[in-house]
Image (tube, grey):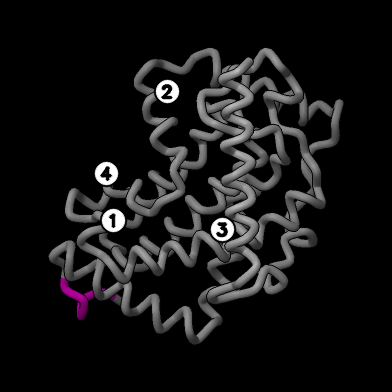
């Protein structure tokens, strides 16, 4: 019980920090992305779709291996460098100072854009719906839909695929894995993850209409490709 309370306090502190950072948009304000009217409502409580959603979480949780648990816990971090297993060991923060800050701004603006939808839909997390679900990451029992982690996974996945189209297939596969790990962790339903995929796509589309964002994206792209030893000129 004491460990669980500590987890809640830590998550609450993180949540306060995230909300504080979301108050000042860097590229786009939260109001620029109306996810409330774009996303389909989550499955209704007691519906067959909701029961199937919960069963999918139970199946994933019961079948997780030690290796999966380690991978899921590592993917609890919302940092672009979780994609280093696709892009290679040189894809790391110390080699990419501008891209590091660029993707941090992407994270903060994207996170702010999903908060209103989470508050509006008020979907309970799987481990709240079924207390027998044992979670393996620090997570407060706040709202579940859409998944912020899945949103981030696809936000950065789409942008990385634009930066390194040579590895687009592997990048999108990694984004899907990153997002699905929230189901394995027991903290999201599959439909939360799907809503995150939609949200990430919509947020990126909004980003790409902003001149400040596009300028920074081109600078981050050049830095990443140079660091990976790729020709900038060959990248469309």
Which image quarter: residue 59?
top right
Nearer to me, 90 or 203: 90
Residue at image mark 1: 167
Q: Quadrant of residue 135?
A: top right
Q: Secondary structure at mark 3?
A: helix
**Distance CA(mark 2)–CA(mark 1):** 26 Å
Residue furthest to the left in view is 229
Q: CA distance from mark 1 to mark 4?
A: 12 Å
Q: Which residues are magenta?
A: 231-235
Residue at which label 4 appears: 85
| Callout 2 crowding tier (Cα within 10 Å): few <14, some 14–19, many ≥20 | some
Q: How far apart are the alpha carbons under marks 1 and 3?
A: 19 Å
Say whether disc 1 or disc 4 marks the residue closer to the N-terminus: 4
Give the percent coordinates (x, y) of residue 169: 35, 52
Residue at image mark 2: 69
Mark 4–mark 2 distance (CA, rounded to whole Å)? 17 Å
């Amino acid at each position: 019980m004491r460990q669980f309370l500590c987890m809640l306090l830590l998550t609450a502190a993180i949540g306060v920090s995230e909300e504080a950072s979301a108050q000042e948009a860097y590229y786009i304000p939260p109001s620029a992305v109306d996810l409330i009217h774009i996303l389909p409502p989550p499955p209704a409580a007691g519906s067959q779709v909701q029961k199937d959603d919960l069963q999918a979480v139970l199946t994933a949780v019961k079948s997780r291996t030690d290796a999966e648990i380690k991978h899921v816990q590592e993917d609890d971090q919302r940092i672009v460098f979780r994609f280093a297993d696709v892009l290679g060991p040189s894809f790391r923060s110390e080699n990419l100072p501008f891209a590091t800050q660029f993707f941090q701004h992407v994270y903060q603006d994207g996170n702010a854009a999903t908060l209103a939808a989470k508050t509006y839909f008020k979907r309970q997390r799987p481990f709240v719906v079924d207390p027998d679900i044992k979670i393996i990451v620090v997570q407060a029992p706040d709202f579940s839909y859409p998944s912020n982690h899945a949103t981030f996974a696809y936000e950065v996945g789409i942008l990385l695929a634009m930066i390194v189209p040579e590895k687009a297939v592997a990048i999108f596969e990694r984004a899907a894995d990153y997002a699905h790990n929230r189901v394995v962790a027991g903290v999201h339903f599959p439909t939360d993850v799907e809503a995150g995929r939609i949200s990430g796509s919509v947020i990126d589309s909004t980003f790409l209409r902003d001149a400040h964002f596009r300028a920074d994206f081109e600078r981050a792209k050049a830095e990443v490709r140079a660091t990976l030893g790729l020709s900038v000129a060959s990248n469309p």
